[in-house]
Amino acid sequence: MPFNRSFRAALTLALMGFTTNSASAATGIRTFDNWLVGCDNTLTCRAIGTMADETDAGSYVVLDRAAGPGATATLRFVRENTPVGDAQGLVLRVDTGAALTLAGSAFRAIEQESDDKPEASELVEPTAVTHALEAMGQGRALRFGKQAPAADAPAVSLAGLAAALRFIDEAQGRQDTVTALLVRGSKSASAVPAAPAMPVLAVVVPNPTRAAPAAVPRALIQRHIRETRDDDCDLGNRAPSGRVIRLSNSTLLYEIGCWRAASQSGSMFYLGSDTQPANASRVDFETLDAETGRLGRPIQALTSASGLEEMSAATLSSLHKDRGAGDCGTAASWVWTGRAFRLSSYATMPVCKGVPPEDWITLWRTGAR
């Protein structure tokens, strides 16, 4: 069911001046009022609607859709401290209008990874998603719950929803087709381009037969301190921490502390050998420009690095929190290819509105072989 004519006319006025095309909107993240939207390198897109007030956090809505003619959209509703995911249905109220009850058969319940988040109700039935989006398109604020929400219940802002839906449609080539999220046209689903292929990285899993040295050589630590004194590293008078991971019988990865804050810390990494550890090369890590979705300037310090100690996935991960609550920032991972670390995933959340890392917007993903 397309959006009605009055809403379509309102959208035309609201979106005048917002122009884009598939090339410019293909990847990267955008903010439209209280909605954020981004698409990754496979044109899988996610839009997140948050509460309007900068001090409000906790309730939000997530819309996901993969690229390609047959891909359908899902809607996930998360309300802080309220278990909404027992698949018994959900009641939506837009502004102060009539409540829209969605049957439990249209949902699947998913467990949130974050301990302080409840299960979420994910609306997966295509017709129900269409009805929910149409209802959301009629107002300014969305409230939801197991029963009809009160007028003063936490509300997700709907300002920016239309622009976010249009961004996804244009990025995925759905304009004027029967598959469009915003305003549907007469073109068939076959007019929608196929999803771009996911890049595949050749991963080398460390499998050394020799143990790693117990500590980073003093000469390398002294060189690290000397060379990073004018960089972003700042440990004050504290000595940097260090550890050594063996990637092969001839290659070592040295991690040396760079900075430390109340809830997180950063490290730099060096690749070297047993015979000449002081000559180890500092590692450059590929990263992404979140606005364009393209590879950006490499970084050298990773925040809260983890992963390689298991030695099974050949993956080094980083989670940088923009504030202690951990509801905004950047999460990325790199895989070892035998010669370098290559970016394998990248997700970000530029606003702090109670959205945990598991729901941040992914802008880069790869496969492994």
Image: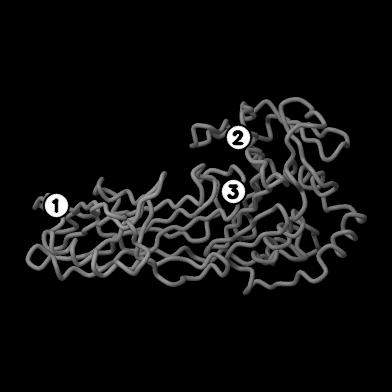
Q: CA distance from mark 2 to mark 3?
A: 19 Å
Q: Quadrant of residue 205?
A: bottom left
Q: CA distance from mark 1 to mark 3?
A: 38 Å
Residue drawn at (52%, 55%) of the image: 348
Q: Residue furthest front?
A: 237
Q: Quadrant of residue 343?
A: bottom left
Name the residue type under label 1.
Ala
Dot 1 or dot 3, earlier in sequence: 1
Q: Residues within 10 Å of mark 1 (few under 14, many from 20)?
A: few
Q: Residue furthest right?
A: 6
Does 284 sit left or right of 242 as displayed? right
For the rendered model, the colour scheme is one colour
Q: Residues within 10 Å of mark 3 (few under 14, many from 20)?
A: many
Q: Position of residue 189 (x, y in %)?
A: 70, 61
Name the residue type under label 2.
Ala
Which one is closest to the eye, mark 2 or mark 3?
3
What residue sits right under mark 2 in the picture? 120
Residue 179 in view (yes/no): no
In the structure shown, which secondary structural element does the residue marked by tag 3 occupy?
loop
Query: In the rendering, which numbered label is found on residue 215?
Result: 1
Q: Residues within 10 Å of mark 2 (few under 14, many from 20)?
A: many
What residue sits right under mark 3 in the picture? 352
Dot 1 or dot 2, earlier in sequence: 2
Of residues 208 and 152, which is closer to you in this image? 152
Residue 85 in view (yes/no): yes
Of residues 126 and 361, which is closer to you in this image? 361
In the structure shown, which secondary structural element does the residue marked by tag 2 occupy?
strand
Q: Position of residue 365 (x, y in %)?
A: 46, 59
Q: Are marks 1 and 3 in contact (CB under 8 Å)?
A: no
